[in-house]
Amino acid sequence: MKEEGIKSYKIPVEAPRDLMEAYLEAKKKALREVLNHITYSRTGKAHLKFEAEDRRRLRNDLLKDWRFSKHYIDSVINSVIGLVKGWIKLHNRGKAKSKPKVTRRTIYIKSSLFSYRNGILRISIEPNKRYLEVDLRKYNWIPSNFDKIGGLILTERELIITVKREVVLKEPRQWASFDINLTNITALIDGKIVRYSLKQLYHIHRVYERKRRRIQKLSKRKPKIAKCLMQKYSKRERNRAKDFMHKLTTKIARELSEMGCGAILEDLKNIKGRILNSSKDVNRKLSNWNPRTFQFMLEYKLKWLNLPVKYVNPSYSSKTCPLCRAEMSAYGGRLMRCKKCNLVLDRDVVAVLNLQMWGLGVAPKALLEALASMMGKRLVNQKPTNFHERLPTVNPHS
Ligand SMILES: [Zn+2]
C-alpha cells in the first residue's frame, strides 16, 4: 500500500528582518481589504465575497514598492483569506470574539520560492539577487531519504521544514500492541512486556501546575502580568511535554523498526472520558497530556520507516480474560482476575494481550507462550488436549 510519509523539523534560522516586517505590513493591508468584502445576511451570518478580480487588484496594489520575490504576495493573500474564512466560521457559530488580527510574524514559503540541491536549501528573498541559504547537512537528525520538501514556514528565529516521502507499507514481520495509561505506556513487543514510564511527563505537569497556582494568586492584583505569565508557562509546559513525547516515540519507532514490527494501537475516540472518570485528582493530572499525541507521533514515525499502524476498539480490553474470554474483575492493586479460569494478571498486561489478539484476529502461539512465561509461578499447567485446555490456567492461591 502506497502512502505519503511526512515529517517536520525546526531548525534555527535568523529570518531577514526587512522581509519579515514588509510581509507583516502587507498582511495587515491585505486583511483590511479582505475584511471589506465580508457581507452579512439578515440573520447576521457573515459571508466572504472575494473574487478573482478582487484578488488581482489586491495583488497589484500590494506589489507596488514590493522589492521582494513576488510569490510572497500570493502567500500573503492566501494566508489572509484563510484567516478570514476561519474567522467567518467561528462568527457564524457565534464563537468569534473580535475581528481577526495579524500579529504573528510567520511567513509561509511556497515551493516556488525555494530550491533544494545537494543538501542546500536556497530560499529566494529578492528576485535573482538575494537568497537565504540553509545547509541541511548540518542537521543530521533530518533524514536525507525524502522525495521532496513540502512548504516551509519561517518565523523570526526558526525555519520549519516539512519533508515528504512516498512510503510503501508492507505487512510487517510481527505486530506490537500498546496500551496507554496515566503513568506508563505498556507494550507487548516480540512476546515481551515492555513498560515505558511517563513519570517524567507527570513531573513536568506537576511543576507547571504549581507555577500556575502561584500565578493565580497574583491575578487579582496584577491581572495583565498574570495572564502574560500564564501564557508563557503554558507554552513552556507544552513544549517540554512535546519534547518528551518526541524522544519517547522516536525511541519506540527505532526499536520496532529493528524488529520489523507494526503497531496495534487503541482507537481512542473516547479515551479522555474513559480515563478521566476515576477522580478529580486524576483529572487534573491528566488534563494536560493527550494520549492521541503519542499515537500520532508514533504513527507518522513508523510510516516513515514503512511500518503500518492498526487501530483496535479498546472497549473491555482490560476486563476480558485473554485466555477464556470471560469477564475479569479487580483483584487488588492493578491486578485483574478471571471469574471463570482464575487467571490473575496486571490490567495493563491484560489490555496489551487483548489488543494484540484482537488486532491480529487470532491468538498467536508465541503470544500465548509469552503469557505462560509471564505468569511464572502463578501458573498451573494442565495436560494439553485441545486448544483451550492447552492454554495455561492459574491458581490464584499459589
Ligand atoms: Zn479466563
Image (cartoon, helix red, strand yellow):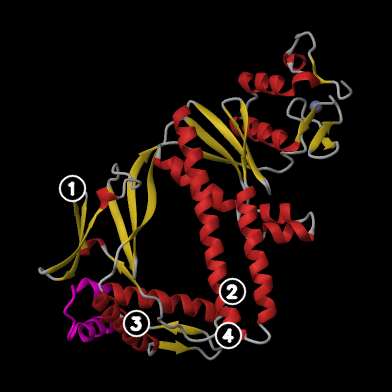
In front of the other: 149 or 185: 185
C-alpha gap between disc 1 and disc 3:
41 Å
Do the numbered discs 4 and 2 sit on residues whose CB atoms are within 8 Å? no
Q: Position of residue 345 (x, y in %)?
A: 77, 31
Mark 3 residue element: loop
Whether the magenta-drawn stretch holds residue 60 is answered as yes
Task: Check disc 4 and report the residue beneath it.
Answer: 224
Which is more N-terminal, label 1 or label 4?
1
Mark number for residue 379? none
Q: Which residues are magenta?
A: 54-74
Labels 4, 1: front one? 4
Which is more N-terminal, label 1 or label 2?
1
C-alpha gap between disc 4 and disc 1:
49 Å
Task: Check disc 2 and report the residue beneath it.
Answer: 230
Labels 4, 3: front one? 4
Q: Which residue ends up furthest to the left in the rendered image?
A: 128
Mark 4 residue element: helix
Mark 4 crowd level (few <14, some 14–19, many ≥20, 10 Å Cα)? few
Residue 137 in view in this figure: yes
Task: Please name the amino acid that badge 1 sits on.
Answer: Asn
C-alpha gap between disc 4 and disc 3:
38 Å
C-alpha gap between disc 2 and disc 1:
44 Å
Is 47 drawn above or below residue 307 in the view shown? below
Task: Check disc 3 and report the residue beneath it.
Answer: 50
- Residue 397 shown left or right of residue 141 in the figure: right
Which is more N-terminal, label 2 or label 4?
4
Mark 3 crowd level (few <14, some 14–19, many ≥20, 10 Å Cα)? some
Whether the magenta-drawn stretch holds residue 204 is answered as no
C-alpha gap between disc 3 and disc 2:
38 Å
Mark number for residue 118? 1
